[in-house]
Image (tube, rainbow, N blue to C red):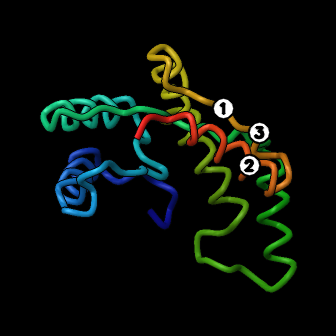
Amino acid sequence: MAKGELVPDETVIRIIAERYDQPDAMNGAVFDGFPRTIAQAQALDTMLAERGRKIDLVLELKVDDAVLLSRVEARIKAGGILRSDDTPETLAHRLAVYYKNTAPLIDYYRQQGKLKTVDGMAPVEAVTAEIAAILDGVPA
């Protein structure tokens, strides 16, 4: 993970399944940054179907790659590297991994009618309000 690589699918799915079966997830869960591959999404769909559940909604926060890079550089200038993996080189690698492995999920969930896209470049308050409005429309 520190190198920007993805954790093997089998490991991630096992961890997600174990966590999802805990009592505090009985009414559902929010997955942040998961799934990251089509294989993980399909395994998640299977795992949820075995439990009589499904994905209701997928949020995509759309951001500009150049802005992400400038944010990393600004954090470094403001006080050094905050995390060992918070470097322009690691970000570039993560973006390459994202476009290769994760970006295909956009079409995967769009085709299922589950994808909602939010402009992640908007002010924090606007992004928060848009996400809240989307979540308000999701059945409990």
Q: Is 42 on the left-hand or right-hand side of 22? A: right
Residue carrying label 3: 119
Q: Position of residue 134 (x, y in %)?
A: 62, 37
Please give the name of the residue rendered at 19% of the width and 30% of the height, measured from the top-left corner. 49
* Total numbered circles: 3
The image quadrant of residue 130 is top right
Above-or-below relation of 72 to 50: below
3 and 1 marks in contact (CB < 8 Å): yes
Q: Relative to 100, say whether 6 is above or below.
A: below
Left or right of residue 75, residue 38 in this image: left
Amino acid type, label 1: Thr
Chain-order first, disc 1 or disc 2: 1
Amino acid residing under circle 3: Asp
Q: Nearer the viewer, residue 73 or 50?
A: 50
Q: Amino acid at mark 2?
A: Ala
Residue 117: assigned label: 1
Where residue 112 sits, quadrant-wise, is top left
Q: CA distance from mark 1 to mark 2?
A: 13 Å
How far apart, in angstroms, are the residues tagged by discs 2 and 3?
11 Å
Residue 126 image offset from top left, x and y in percent = 81, 49
Above or below 65: residue 50: above
Q: Residue at x 47, y 24 (%)?
A: 109
Quadrant location of the C terminus? top left
Indicate the quadrant containing the N terminus: top left, top right, bottom left or bottom right.
Answer: bottom left
For mark 3, does the 10 Å Cα neighbourhood hold few (<14), some (14 to 19), or many (20 or more) residues?
some
